[in-house]
Image (tube, rainbow, N blue to C red):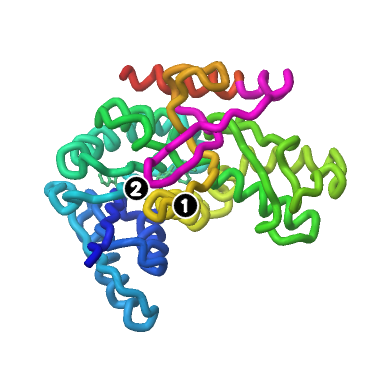
Amino acid sequence: MAQRKKIALIGAGQIGGTLALLAGQKELGDVVLVDIMEGVAKGKALDLQETRGVGKWDVDVTGGGTTDYSVIRDADVCIVTAGVPRKPGMSREDLLKVNLDAITKVAHGIKQYAPNAFVIVITNPLDSMVYAMYKVTGFPKNRVVGMAGVLDTARFQYFVGDAAGVSPQDVQAMVLGGHGDDMVPLLRYSSVAGVPLTRLLDKARLDAIVERTRKGGGEIVALLGTGSAFYAPAAAAISMAEAYLRDKKRVLPCSALLEGQYGVKGLFVGVPVVIGAGGVERVLEVELNDDERAMLQRSVDSVKKSVAETKL
Ligand code: A3D
Protein backbone atom coordinates (compact mmCIF):
# COMPACT_ATOMS: atom_id res chain seq x y z
CA MET A 1 0.00 0.00 0.00
CA ALA A 2 1.28 3.44 -0.85
CA GLN A 3 2.51 5.32 2.18
CA ARG A 4 1.19 8.78 2.89
CA LYS A 5 3.48 11.64 1.98
CA LYS A 6 4.89 13.76 4.80
CA ILE A 7 4.82 17.53 4.93
CA ALA A 8 6.93 19.43 7.47
CA LEU A 9 5.81 22.97 8.24
CA ILE A 10 8.62 24.82 9.97
CA GLY A 11 7.13 27.83 11.66
CA ALA A 12 3.69 27.25 13.15
CA GLY A 13 2.54 30.86 13.19
CA GLN A 14 -0.20 32.47 11.14
CA ILE A 15 0.90 31.02 7.80
CA GLY A 16 2.10 27.71 9.27
CA GLY A 17 -1.27 27.02 10.93
CA THR A 18 -3.16 27.89 7.74
CA LEU A 19 -0.82 25.68 5.71
CA ALA A 20 -1.55 22.79 8.06
CA LEU A 21 -5.30 23.25 7.70
CA LEU A 22 -5.14 23.44 3.89
CA ALA A 23 -2.73 20.50 3.59
CA GLY A 24 -5.01 18.48 5.87
CA GLN A 25 -8.19 19.37 4.01
CA LYS A 26 -6.55 18.44 0.72
CA GLU A 27 -5.10 15.27 2.29
CA LEU A 28 -1.73 16.07 0.74
CA GLY A 29 0.02 14.00 3.41
CA ASP A 30 0.68 13.73 7.13
CA VAL A 31 1.64 17.11 8.53
CA VAL A 32 4.18 17.95 11.20
CA LEU A 33 4.33 21.48 12.60
CA VAL A 34 7.59 22.67 14.15
CA ASP A 35 8.18 25.93 16.02
CA ILE A 36 10.54 27.42 18.58
CA MET A 37 7.34 27.83 20.56
CA GLU A 38 6.77 24.11 20.95
CA GLY A 39 3.41 24.56 22.69
CA VAL A 40 2.09 26.56 19.73
CA ALA A 41 3.09 23.80 17.29
CA LYS A 42 1.59 21.10 19.52
CA GLY A 43 -1.53 23.11 20.33
CA LYS A 44 -2.31 23.91 16.69
CA ALA A 45 -1.64 20.29 15.72
CA LEU A 46 -4.06 19.02 18.36
CA ASP A 47 -6.69 21.61 17.41
CA LEU A 48 -6.40 20.45 13.78
CA GLN A 49 -6.64 16.77 14.72
CA GLU A 50 -9.85 17.68 16.48
CA THR A 51 -11.32 19.11 13.26
CA ARG A 52 -10.82 15.86 11.33
CA GLY A 53 -14.03 14.16 12.38
CA VAL A 54 -16.20 17.06 11.36
CA GLY A 55 -14.00 18.11 8.42
CA LYS A 56 -13.84 14.54 7.13
CA TRP A 57 -10.18 14.30 6.26
CA ASP A 58 -7.70 11.62 7.20
CA VAL A 59 -4.11 12.67 7.57
CA ASP A 60 -2.28 13.12 10.85
CA VAL A 61 -1.17 16.48 12.20
CA THR A 62 1.49 16.47 14.90
CA GLY A 63 3.64 19.17 16.44
CA GLY A 64 7.09 19.57 17.93
CA GLY A 65 9.76 22.04 18.99
CA THR A 66 13.05 23.05 17.43
CA THR A 67 15.15 21.22 20.00
CA ASP A 68 14.34 18.00 18.18
CA TYR A 69 14.23 18.25 14.41
CA SER A 70 13.99 14.46 14.13
CA VAL A 71 10.19 14.90 13.95
CA ILE A 72 10.63 16.07 10.34
CA ARG A 73 12.54 12.90 9.44
CA ASP A 74 12.12 11.90 5.79
CA ALA A 75 9.61 14.67 5.01
CA ASP A 76 8.78 14.87 1.30
CA VAL A 77 8.07 18.60 1.44
CA CYS A 78 9.25 21.25 3.92
CA ILE A 79 7.52 24.62 3.91
CA VAL A 80 9.43 27.21 5.90
CA THR A 81 7.84 30.25 7.53
CA ALA A 82 10.12 30.39 10.57
CA GLY A 83 11.05 33.93 11.50
CA VAL A 84 9.18 37.13 12.17
CA PRO A 85 6.78 38.94 9.85
CA ARG A 86 7.06 42.60 8.89
CA LYS A 87 5.74 45.15 11.32
CA PRO A 88 4.14 48.41 10.10
CA GLY A 89 6.86 50.68 8.74
CA MET A 90 9.40 47.85 8.57
CA SER A 91 10.80 47.00 5.12
CA ARG A 92 11.38 43.42 4.03
CA GLU A 93 15.08 44.19 4.09
CA ASP A 94 14.89 45.23 7.78
CA LEU A 95 13.84 41.69 8.45
CA LEU A 96 16.94 40.17 6.97
CA LYS A 97 19.12 40.05 10.03
CA VAL A 98 16.52 38.46 12.30
CA ASN A 99 15.27 35.94 9.80
CA LEU A 100 18.65 34.87 8.41
CA ASP A 101 19.48 33.40 11.80
CA ALA A 102 16.21 31.43 11.85
CA ILE A 103 16.61 30.18 8.27
CA THR A 104 20.17 29.02 8.92
CA LYS A 105 19.08 26.92 11.90
CA VAL A 106 16.11 25.51 10.01
CA ALA A 107 18.28 24.69 6.98
CA HIS A 108 20.64 22.64 9.16
CA GLY A 109 17.65 20.70 10.57
CA ILE A 110 16.27 20.00 7.10
CA LYS A 111 19.66 18.96 5.77
CA GLN A 112 20.10 16.48 8.61
CA TYR A 113 16.62 14.94 8.77
CA ALA A 114 14.91 15.53 5.42
CA PRO A 115 17.76 15.40 2.91
CA ASN A 116 15.47 14.50 -0.01
CA ALA A 117 12.76 17.09 0.63
CA PHE A 118 11.40 19.68 -1.77
CA VAL A 119 11.82 22.91 0.20
CA ILE A 120 9.50 25.89 -0.20
CA VAL A 121 10.65 29.05 1.57
CA ILE A 122 8.17 31.77 2.50
CA THR A 123 10.12 33.70 5.15
CA ASN A 124 10.95 37.28 4.12
CA PRO A 125 12.98 38.88 2.66
CA LEU A 126 12.07 36.08 0.37
CA ASP A 127 14.67 36.09 -2.39
CA SER A 128 17.61 36.23 0.02
CA MET A 129 16.10 33.73 2.49
CA VAL A 130 15.59 31.14 -0.26
CA TYR A 131 19.15 31.81 -1.39
CA ALA A 132 20.36 31.19 2.18
CA MET A 133 18.33 27.95 2.34
CA TYR A 134 19.94 26.80 -0.92
CA LYS A 135 23.45 27.65 0.28
CA VAL A 136 23.16 26.13 3.77
CA THR A 137 21.41 22.90 2.75
CA GLY A 138 23.55 22.44 -0.38
CA PHE A 139 20.45 20.89 -1.99
CA PRO A 140 20.22 20.81 -5.78
CA LYS A 141 18.55 23.86 -7.35
CA ASN A 142 15.41 21.96 -8.35
CA ARG A 143 14.61 21.22 -4.69
CA VAL A 144 14.75 24.73 -3.24
CA VAL A 145 12.22 27.36 -4.26
CA GLY A 146 10.66 30.52 -2.89
CA MET A 147 6.96 31.36 -2.74
CA ALA A 148 6.13 34.90 -3.83
CA GLY A 149 5.02 35.08 -7.45
CA VAL A 150 1.97 32.86 -6.93
CA LEU A 151 0.82 35.23 -4.18
CA ASP A 152 1.61 38.39 -6.15
CA THR A 153 -0.21 36.92 -9.14
CA ALA A 154 -3.19 35.96 -7.00
CA ARG A 155 -3.43 39.52 -5.71
CA PHE A 156 -3.28 40.85 -9.26
CA GLN A 157 -5.95 38.33 -10.32
CA TYR A 158 -8.25 39.52 -7.56
CA PHE A 159 -7.76 43.23 -8.30
CA VAL A 160 -8.34 42.73 -12.05
CA GLY A 161 -11.32 40.44 -11.44
CA ASP A 162 -12.85 42.96 -9.05
CA ALA A 163 -12.32 45.90 -11.44
CA ALA A 164 -13.56 44.03 -14.52
CA GLY A 165 -16.45 42.28 -12.79
CA VAL A 166 -15.13 38.78 -13.57
CA SER A 167 -13.93 35.84 -11.51
CA PRO A 168 -10.27 36.05 -10.43
CA GLN A 169 -10.06 32.42 -11.61
CA ASP A 170 -10.39 33.59 -15.20
CA VAL A 171 -7.64 36.17 -14.92
CA GLN A 172 -4.31 34.98 -16.31
CA ALA A 173 -1.39 36.92 -14.97
CA MET A 174 2.37 36.76 -14.69
CA VAL A 175 4.61 38.58 -12.23
CA LEU A 176 8.39 38.53 -12.56
CA GLY A 177 11.24 39.71 -10.38
CA GLY A 178 12.06 39.87 -6.70
CA HIS A 179 9.36 39.92 -4.05
CA GLY A 180 9.51 43.61 -3.32
CA ASP A 181 7.83 46.82 -4.28
CA ASP A 182 9.70 46.72 -7.59
CA MET A 183 8.28 43.37 -8.75
CA VAL A 184 7.30 43.34 -12.43
CA PRO A 185 3.68 42.48 -13.27
CA LEU A 186 3.71 41.66 -17.01
CA LEU A 187 0.58 43.21 -18.47
CA ARG A 188 1.43 42.01 -21.99
CA TYR A 189 1.21 38.42 -20.79
CA SER A 190 -1.98 38.92 -18.79
CA SER A 191 -5.54 38.42 -19.94
CA VAL A 192 -9.08 37.56 -18.90
CA ALA A 193 -9.63 34.12 -20.42
CA GLY A 194 -7.46 35.15 -23.37
CA VAL A 195 -8.99 38.63 -23.80
CA PRO A 196 -6.20 41.25 -23.43
CA LEU A 197 -6.59 43.31 -20.26
CA THR A 198 -6.35 46.52 -22.26
CA ARG A 199 -9.70 45.63 -23.89
CA LEU A 200 -11.40 45.52 -20.51
CA LEU A 201 -9.69 48.17 -18.41
CA ASP A 202 -8.20 51.54 -19.28
CA LYS A 203 -4.56 52.39 -18.73
CA ALA A 204 -5.13 54.42 -15.57
CA ARG A 205 -7.05 51.55 -14.00
CA LEU A 206 -4.36 49.05 -14.97
CA ASP A 207 -1.56 51.27 -13.68
CA ALA A 208 -3.39 51.55 -10.35
CA ILE A 209 -3.77 47.76 -10.19
CA VAL A 210 -0.07 47.23 -10.87
CA GLU A 211 0.79 49.68 -8.11
CA ARG A 212 -1.65 48.06 -5.68
CA THR A 213 -0.20 44.61 -6.47
CA ARG A 214 3.33 45.87 -5.80
CA LYS A 215 2.26 47.24 -2.44
CA GLY A 216 -0.18 44.38 -1.70
CA GLY A 217 1.78 43.04 1.27
CA GLY A 218 2.06 46.48 2.89
CA GLU A 219 -1.66 47.16 2.43
CA ILE A 220 -2.52 44.12 4.53
CA VAL A 221 0.18 44.84 7.12
CA ALA A 222 -1.31 48.32 7.61
CA LEU A 223 -4.84 46.96 7.96
CA LEU A 224 -3.99 44.15 10.35
CA GLY A 225 -1.90 46.37 12.59
CA THR A 226 0.01 43.34 13.76
CA GLY A 227 1.41 40.57 11.55
CA SER A 228 1.13 40.21 7.79
CA ALA A 229 -1.00 38.40 5.23
CA PHE A 230 -1.42 34.68 5.81
CA TYR A 231 -4.44 33.16 4.04
CA ALA A 232 -3.34 33.95 0.49
CA PRO A 233 0.36 33.22 1.15
CA ALA A 234 -0.59 29.81 2.58
CA ALA A 235 -2.91 29.00 -0.33
CA ALA A 236 -0.14 29.98 -2.76
CA ALA A 237 2.46 27.73 -1.12
CA ILE A 238 0.01 24.83 -0.96
CA SER A 239 -0.52 25.08 -4.73
CA MET A 240 3.26 24.70 -5.14
CA ALA A 241 3.47 21.74 -2.74
CA GLU A 242 0.53 20.07 -4.47
CA ALA A 243 2.12 20.56 -7.90
CA TYR A 244 5.19 18.71 -6.61
CA LEU A 245 3.44 15.92 -4.69
CA ARG A 246 0.93 15.21 -7.46
CA ASP A 247 3.36 15.80 -10.35
CA LYS A 248 1.02 18.38 -11.84
CA LYS A 249 3.60 20.19 -14.03
CA ARG A 250 1.97 23.48 -13.08
CA VAL A 251 3.44 26.64 -14.52
CA LEU A 252 3.81 28.91 -11.52
CA PRO A 253 5.80 32.08 -10.92
CA CYS A 254 8.31 31.20 -8.18
CA SER A 255 11.65 32.37 -6.89
CA ALA A 256 14.06 29.95 -8.56
CA LEU A 257 17.81 29.82 -9.07
CA LEU A 258 18.72 31.43 -12.39
CA GLU A 259 21.79 30.34 -14.27
CA GLY A 260 21.80 32.74 -17.17
CA GLN A 261 18.06 32.88 -17.88
CA TYR A 262 16.82 36.47 -18.14
CA GLY A 263 20.51 37.46 -18.10
CA VAL A 264 20.77 36.60 -14.37
CA LYS A 265 23.26 34.19 -12.82
CA GLY A 266 23.45 32.79 -9.30
CA LEU A 267 20.41 34.56 -7.81
CA PHE A 268 16.92 33.41 -6.89
CA VAL A 269 14.46 35.62 -8.73
CA GLY A 270 10.75 35.26 -9.48
CA VAL A 271 10.20 33.66 -12.89
CA PRO A 272 7.70 31.22 -14.39
CA VAL A 273 8.75 27.65 -13.64
CA VAL A 274 7.30 24.18 -14.17
CA ILE A 275 6.73 22.34 -10.88
CA GLY A 276 6.24 18.58 -11.00
CA ALA A 277 7.68 15.47 -9.38
CA GLY A 278 11.16 16.67 -10.30
CA GLY A 279 10.66 19.84 -8.24
CA VAL A 280 11.49 22.92 -10.26
CA GLU A 281 11.73 21.05 -13.54
CA ARG A 282 12.23 24.01 -15.86
CA VAL A 283 12.49 27.77 -15.92
CA LEU A 284 10.36 29.26 -18.71
CA GLU A 285 11.78 32.28 -20.45
CA VAL A 286 9.41 34.80 -21.92
CA GLU A 287 10.52 37.56 -24.25
CA LEU A 288 10.70 40.97 -22.64
CA ASN A 289 10.61 44.38 -24.30
CA ASP A 290 13.05 47.13 -23.30
CA ASP A 291 10.79 48.59 -20.61
CA GLU A 292 10.11 45.22 -19.04
CA ARG A 293 13.79 44.32 -19.12
CA ALA A 294 14.68 47.60 -17.41
CA MET A 295 12.05 46.97 -14.70
CA LEU A 296 13.32 43.44 -14.17
CA GLN A 297 16.89 44.71 -13.93
CA ARG A 298 15.88 47.16 -11.19
CA SER A 299 14.21 44.35 -9.31
CA VAL A 300 17.20 42.03 -9.76
CA ASP A 301 19.49 44.79 -8.45
CA SER A 302 17.45 44.93 -5.22
CA VAL A 303 17.64 41.14 -4.86
CA LYS A 304 21.41 41.30 -5.40
CA LYS A 305 21.75 43.91 -2.66
CA SER A 306 19.69 41.87 -0.22
CA VAL A 307 21.60 38.66 -0.99
CA ALA A 308 24.91 40.47 -0.47
CA GLU A 309 23.76 41.31 3.07
CA THR A 310 23.53 37.60 3.90
CA LYS A 311 27.30 37.31 3.29
CA LEU A 312 26.78 33.72 2.09
P1 A3D B 1 4.25 34.36 12.45
O1 A3D B 1 2.81 34.21 12.71
O2 A3D B 1 5.03 35.27 13.35
O3 A3D B 1 4.93 32.92 12.46
C1 A3D B 1 6.30 32.73 12.41
C2 A3D B 1 6.61 31.60 13.38
O4 A3D B 1 7.99 31.28 13.23
C3 A3D B 1 6.37 31.96 14.84
O5 A3D B 1 5.44 31.07 15.42
C4 A3D B 1 7.76 31.83 15.47
O6 A3D B 1 7.72 31.33 16.80
C5 A3D B 1 8.42 30.86 14.53
N1 A3D B 1 9.88 30.87 14.55
C6 A3D B 1 10.72 31.92 14.70
N2 A3D B 1 11.99 31.49 14.65
C7 A3D B 1 11.96 30.14 14.45
C8 A3D B 1 12.95 29.13 14.32
N3 A3D B 1 14.25 29.42 14.39
N4 A3D B 1 12.53 27.88 14.12
C9 A3D B 1 11.21 27.56 14.05
N5 A3D B 1 10.24 28.47 14.19
C10 A3D B 1 10.61 29.75 14.39
O7 A3D B 1 4.53 34.88 10.96
P2 A3D B 1 3.71 34.50 9.63
O8 A3D B 1 3.41 33.06 9.65
O9 A3D B 1 2.65 35.49 9.43
O10 A3D B 1 4.85 34.80 8.54
C11 A3D B 1 6.00 34.00 8.46
C12 A3D B 1 7.02 34.59 7.49
O11 A3D B 1 6.47 34.63 6.17
C13 A3D B 1 7.44 36.03 7.81
O12 A3D B 1 8.83 36.16 7.59
C14 A3D B 1 6.69 36.85 6.77
O13 A3D B 1 7.34 38.08 6.46
C15 A3D B 1 6.73 35.90 5.59
N6 A3D B 1 5.74 36.17 4.55
C16 A3D B 1 6.16 36.07 3.26
C17 A3D B 1 5.29 36.31 2.23
C18 A3D B 1 5.77 36.19 0.81
O14 A3D B 1 5.02 36.42 -0.10
C19 A3D B 1 7.14 35.81 0.54
C20 A3D B 1 3.96 36.65 2.50
C21 A3D B 1 3.56 36.74 3.82
C22 A3D B 1 4.47 36.50 4.86
Q: Is mark 2 within 8 Å of ligand 1?
A: no
Query: In the rendered view, does 274 fall on the left or right side of 195?
Result: left
* Element carrying mark 1: loop
Query: Does residue 133 appear in this view?
Result: yes
Task: Write the start and end of the magenta stretch as one range.
Answer: 268-296
**Residue displayed at 44% across by 33% down:** 125
- Based on the picture, tell me whether residue 288 belongs to the magenta stretch: yes
Which residue is rendered at x = 22% and y = 60% of the image?
63
Regarding residue 226, the answer to whether it shows in the image is no
Magenta region includes residue 173? no
Residue 180 as seen in the image, left or right of residue 74? right
- Give the residue number, with chain letter if any, for mark 1: 248
Q: Which picture quadrant has residue 307?
A: top left
On screen, residue 151 versus residue 44, left or right, reads: right
Give the image location of residue 277, x and y in percent.
38, 46
- Please report the residue visible at 32 percent of the width from the left and 82 percent of the height from the top: 53
The residue under label 2 is 79
Closer to us: 288 or 123: 288
